[in-house]
Amino acid sequence: MDSYNFKVIARIKSDFPEKFGIPRQSGLLPNLRSTIRFEPEFRNADALRGLEGFSHLWILWIFSENVRDTWSPTVRPPRLGGNKRLGVFATRSSFRPNPIAMSCVKIEEIRLEGTNGPEIIVSGADLMDGTPIVDIKPYLPFADSVPEAKGGFAESVKGNNLEVEIPSTLLEKIPAEKREALMQLLGQDPRPHYQDDSERMYGFNFSGFEIKFKVSGSKLTVESIQEIL
């Protein structure tokens, strides 16, 4: 069997130190900012020449937390509650023969200078902090966009937003520029879809804070926000 080795060209700097809470797809949280920070070997501004003419990027990255020696032809998509098996190639599950993922993100800023430069500030990424990136490619609207494309089973589970309630005294703990992204994230229900316990306390880390919440029906209430020291 042929095999190939990839070099890690960059890593993402994001607000998610662990998997729980990360958006389920790229582009769902337009206010969420992340940074593509190149490895020393690839910190060359010439490699980004011409990128300023594009608005979006494809990021090719590794499911580094789900690397396995075996694979299964079927998986249980969380978006279907984990109760139905589908073919692995009909899903975007992280449990794949090769742990490769792709995300479409918006370029917010390209910084050529600085200690870590060049680096790219993007919005809409769905990567855990430190995730290894093996390539980036410009998004081409005339080739990559297919407006009439079908979304399969994913169409039936999109748009299930919750009403979010956060006491102002808690929300004020979050930096102002990150509050809208947090609200959007909570509204999209970060819980696994097979969990629906109104008494259960859920929690995840976001941008240096531990967020704890409960969900009852279609309402999510944040119970506490604590800075992680």
Image (cartoon, grey):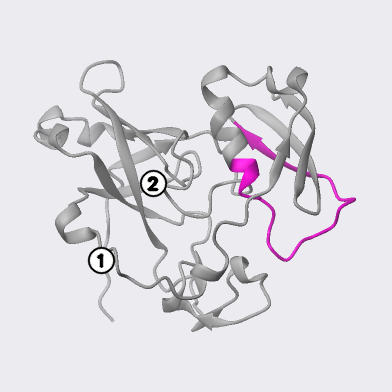
Residue 195 inside the magenta-drawn segment: yes
Residues 99 and 138: in front is 138
Residues 149 and 198: in front is 149
How many other residues sit within 10 Å of disc 1, few (<14), some (14-19) or many (≥20)?
Answer: few
Give the residue pinned by disc 1: 4
What number is the disc on residue 165?
Answer: none
Secondary element under disc 2, as helix, strand or loop, is strand
What kind of residue is marked 2? Pro
The answer to whether residue 189 is above or below residue 112 is: below
227 sits left or right of 121 in the view = right
**x%, y% of residue 103?**
36, 52
Q: Main secondary structure of the magenta part?
A: loop
Give the extent of the magenta segment.
185-206
**x%, y% of residue 13?**
43, 33
Give the residue pinned by disc 2: 132
User: Does residue 206 appear in the picture of this structure?
Assistant: yes
188 sits left or right of 56 in the view = right
User: Does residue 17 appear in the picture of this structure?
Assistant: no
Q: Residue at x 77, y 37 (%)?
A: 212
**Image quadrant in which the N terminus is located:** bottom left
Residues 45 and 21: in front is 21
Q: Residue at x 46, y 39 (%)?
A: 130
The answer to whether residue 188 is above or below residue 179 is: below
Q: Residue furthest right?
A: 199
Q: Quadrant of residue 55?
A: top left
Residue 85 inside the magenta-drawn segment: no
18 sits left or right of 193 in the view = left
What kind of residue is marked 1? Tyr
